[in-house]
């Protein structure tokens, strides 16, 4: 999709999420949500602006370009997909944190394969049940 660092992807993903529910997004909104300093947000916004993902004037509102909306939508869906996958395989972890750790390092081909698995398991509950039984039995013997 886009060649951004994991950190810049996080900024764009949060900007996209904000854009779905708020008319305006400000530097302080991102700073609070991501737990980073205002100068860090400003630096990231400058890079996103240079990459033509956002429109931004210093001390002004932040809005997404079409390119930013498209990539932001992909990033949010990718995160949601990975969380759904982790739930489906019944992993015992912090689902949100695990999905966050995975999302930046998987190729689009791997994401497509995970999507196929998620779709298959959702459409075939009997196979999902077999998989969960296998996971449960193998976790007892592989400790």
Image (tube, helix red, strand yellow):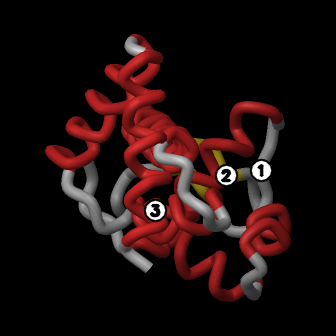
Task: State the residue position of label 2.
Answer: 62
Instruction: Determine whether, in the image, residue 133 is placed left or right of residue 36.
Output: left
Q: Are marks 1 and 2 in contact (CB under 8 Å)?
A: yes
Mark closer to the chain start, 1 or 3: 3
- What residue sits 62% from the left and 66% below the top? 93
Picture coordinates of residue 73, whole percent (x, y): 48, 35
Picture coordinates of residue 19, whole percent (x, y): 70, 38
- The total number of labels drawn is 3
Task: State the residue position of label 3.
Answer: 9
The image quadrant that residue 87 belongs to is: top right
Instruction: Give whichever of 46, 141 is nearer the camera.
Output: 141
Q: What SS does tag 3 mark?
A: helix
Q: Is residue 114 above or below residue 94?
A: above
Mark-to-mark CA distance, 1 and 2:
5 Å
Instruction: Give whichever of 4, 119 is nearer the camera.
Output: 119
Name the residue furthest left.
109
Task: State the residue position of label 1.
Answer: 25
Instruction: Determine whether, in the image, residue 113 is placed left or right of residue 53.
Output: left
Q: Nearer the viewer, mark 3 or mark 2?
A: 3
Q: Is residue 29 above or below residue 7?
A: above
Q: Is residue 33 above or below residue 84?
A: below
In this orientation, does residue 114 appear?
Answer: yes
Picture coordinates of residue 66, whole percent (x, y): 43, 32
- What residue sits 64% from the left and 54% below the top? 14
Q: Bin the neighbour count of mark 2 within 10 Å (Cα to Cα): few under 14, some 14-19, many 20 and up.
A: many
Mark-to-mark CA distance, 3 and 2:
16 Å
């Amino acid at each position: 999709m886009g060649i951004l660092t994991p950190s810049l992807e996080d900024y764009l993903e949060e900007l996209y999420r904000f854009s779905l529910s708020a008319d305006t997004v400000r530097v302080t909104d991102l700073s609070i949500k991501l737990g980073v300093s205002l100068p860090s947000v400003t630096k990231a916004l400058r890079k996103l602006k240079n990459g033509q993902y956002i429109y931004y004037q210093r001390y002004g509102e932040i809005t997404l370009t079409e390119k930013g909306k498209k990539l932001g939508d992909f990033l949010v869906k990718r995160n949601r997909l990975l969380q759904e996958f982790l739930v489906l395989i019944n992993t015992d972890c912090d689902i949100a944190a695990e999905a966050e750790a995975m999302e930046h390092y998987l190729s689009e081909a791997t994401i497509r394969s995970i999507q196929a698995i998620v779709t298959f398991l959702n459409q075939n509950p009997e196979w999902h049940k077999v998989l969960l039984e296998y996971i449960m039995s193998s976790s007892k013997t592989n400790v």
